[in-house]
Image (cartoon, helix red, strand yellow):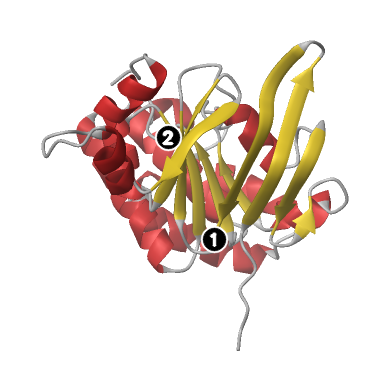
Amino acid sequence: MVVTVPAIVAEDLKKQFGELVAVDGVSFTVEAGEVFGFLGPNGAGKTTTMKMIQCVSPKTGGKLEVFGMDVSTHQREIKKLLGVVPQENNLDPDFTAYDNLMVYSRYFDIHRAKAERAIEEFLDFVQLREKKDTLIEQLSGGMKRRLILARALINMPRLLILDEPTIGLDPQARHLIWDKLKSLQSQGITIVLTTHYLEEAARLCDRLVIMDYGKIIVEGTPDELVQEYAGTRSATLEDVFLKLTGKKLRE
């Protein structure tokens, strides 16, 4: 019998900045191969939680493991298994699309020939092959987000972390990225994301949590949450979110 280790296990996880408690004793498990979402208003603790998973912000207390490894003692090993799509577009404007990916591959000490093959593959995957020699400033917002997704895949990650992956995009560009993420899940990649778009959470997430004031209010599948907390046939995640937090996410 093969036992699969969860992608992420958090127990009573805490993060403080001085007197500010940004993450206040949250517990959750992300199973390997699922899409897991974090919803919440600004300041709820979503991005702070993601940064602890990425090993770029040390936890203040509690337990946090990624593929069975403690984030406090195995940062290097964990980072090798991660692909990260940050909220901001942080591509190098002085390089072409292709060169951005090549430079990034060097951080993982990927052999040049292997990197070249991977770059061609992932430019195809995000439908940007014809833009490979284009400077970053000449790409649209949607193209930049797709290129950042390609960059996150260069090291063949087991876990993909996305912070607001489609923020600011038009519906067509957003749907294209959704399709790519579902394709990645079908290949066995675990995906964790934060989003302000409730339709995005409903379409992509196998399970999700709603956070507010650094705490997890509720956890479940999108359908379970709608059924339990809204209870009407026409209800949506937006109705659930409003009922639980008294706030609206931007749409």
Percent x, y of residue 61: 81, 35
Q: Can you tell which quarter of the image residue 250 is in?
A: top left
Above or below: residue 151 compared with residue 33: above
**SS label for mark 2:** helix
Q: Considering the image in quadrants, where does the C terminus appear? A: top left
**SS label for mark 1:** loop
The residue pinned by badge 1 equals: 31
Q: Is residue 108 visible?
A: no
Please state which amino acid type lies under the numbered disc 2: Lys
Q: Nearer the viewer, residue 196 or 158?
A: 196
Percent x, y of residue 39: 44, 31
Can you tell which mark lies on residue 23? none
Please state which amino acid type lies under the numbered disc 1: Glu
Q: Considering the image in quadrants, where does the N terminus appear? A: bottom right
**Residue drawn 61% across and 84% down?**
2
Q: Can you tell which quarter of the image residue 228 is in?
A: top left
**Residue drawn 42% across and 34% down?**
144
Above or below: residue 140 compared with residue 37: above
The residue pinned by badge 2 equals: 144
Percent x, y of residue 108: 73, 55
Q: Can you name the residue that lies furthest to the right here?
A: 73
Give the number of the mark in front: 2 or 1. 1
Q: Nearer the viewer, residue 104 or 238?
A: 238
Q: Can you name the residue that lies furthest to the top here?
A: 19
